[in-house]
Image: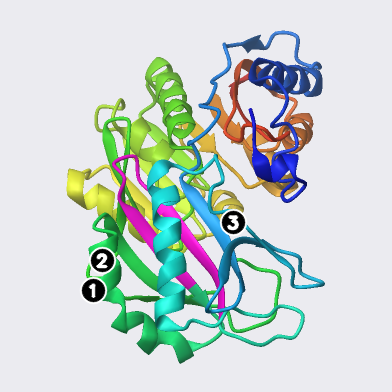
Amino acid sequence: MECAYFRDDLCSSCPSIETAYTAQVQAKQEHARALLAAHPQLQWLDPVTSAEAGFRNKAKLVVGGSAKNPTLGIVEYRTGASTDLGECPLYMEPIQAAIPVLRELIQRADLTPYDIPNRRGELKNILVTASAEGELMVRFVLRSKKLLVPIRRQMDWLQERLPNLAVLSVNLLREPVARVEGDEEIILSERQTLPMQVNNLTLHLRPQSFFQTNTKVAEAMYAQGREWVREVAPRSLWDLYCGVGGFALHAASVMGGGSVTGIEISAEAVASAQRTVAEYGLESVDFSAQDAPEFAVSSGTVPQMLVVNPPRRGIGESLCAWIEGSGIDRVVYSSCNAVTLAKDLERMPVYAPVQGRVLDMFPHTDHYEVMVLLQRQ
């Protein structure tokens, strides 16, 4: 695929963008197979592929330049040199259409970009998320509350220019640290969540909730998890690292009233999941904001089936040890890092991966999602 930013050495985020897409997917399959070669019984399903462009539902735009001539893209942290990526081909069309409007808003409201090397200015990042239906959540990451009033004054103008704007908020990142966002969120819009239609479910995203960046591939991921749950037909299931409840809610739809528990450290994500539960009236589904390994180890009970979807570091030694001794018959492990997945499987020799699938969540990079169904031997 052609990308002017990559061609002109302005952005290196997609190192494989000039490699044929079929070759990219094949390389990821081979990488996953090699890492899990110790499990010859593993049956690999066909990979899930992505659109090559227009698939990314989230833009993390670092603000550079000046209030009169802002850039939205990336910034070189040592020098402060900025590159505008407003026409990045990966973004969904509603995000691409919103970027010029957000650039104009910065000019209208005189929002001073944060100068990283000199630690001056206010506006650090703009985070934009798009639903499959084209609605937007826009978040301004600020150094302080200084720009709150100017942003509020432009809300009517912004809503007029972006009629698909559902959620608008300010996030405060006061410290000069290498983070995209801080812990404090101020919601400016009447609506507080962005509805995300995923297969036959409507999930809700609050501003600080995590959701996969590729909605179509996420749909396939949740559908695969649902199918494995359907085949096992458990009466109880835990979804650890559940986020906004994607796996748990898909599982509940095929469990006929069986008990489903979702555990997630992020209170924002749990609040999002609880809203979905309330909307669908799911009395047998419960979500709780807790540390996943601590919950499992201290619970005193075990489910019939387990789903884990950890961050890149994997589930780690303590949770692996607990699962190994739990007696749970089937485990669905969804991983965004096949290296740590392989290490975790080494720690659980009583479980054998019987089916696996590569999902290309992140085209044009070396990263991918891989799911395995584990069966206790």
Q: Name the quadrant containing residue 84.
A: bottom right
Can you say whether 313 is above or below 108 in the image? Answer: above
| Of residues 1 and 14, the one drawn nearer to the viewer in this rendering | 1
What crowding class fits label 3: few (fewer than 14 Cα within 10 Å), some (14-19), or many (20 or more)? few
Q: How many marks?
A: 3
Whether the magenta-drawn stretch holds residue 125 is answered as yes
Query: Quarter-wise, where is residue 133 in the image?
Result: top left
**Residue at far bottom of view:** 146
Q: Earlier in the sequence, mark 1 or mark 3?
A: 1
Question: Can you say whether 153 is above or below 258 in the image?
Answer: below
Q: Residue at x 22, y 70 (%)?
A: 190
Q: Which residue is mark 1?
A: 156
Q: Which residue is mark 2?
A: 159
Is residue 151 visible in this depiction of the protein?
yes
- Amino acid residing under circle 2: Gln
| Residue 24 counted in the magenta span | no
Which residue is at the front of the view, 124 or 296? 124
Name which of mark 2 and mark 3 comes first in the sequence: 2
Q: Is residue 274 left or right of residue 225?
A: left
For label 1, the crowd category at 10 Å Cα-Cα, with few meaning under 14, some 14 to 19 and many 20 or more, is few
Work out how far the residue at label 2 is from the one at label 3, CA to CA, in angstroms.
43 Å
In this rendered view, identify the residue nearer to me: 360 or 157.
157
Secondary structure predominantly adopted by residues drawn in magenta: strand
What residue is rendered at 72% in x and 28% in y?
18
Percent from the top left, x then y, of residue 185?
Answer: 43, 75
- Which residues, given as a range, are shown in magenta? 123-140
Which numbered circle lies on residue 294? 3
Q: Are marks 1 and 2 in contact (CB under 8 Å)?
A: yes
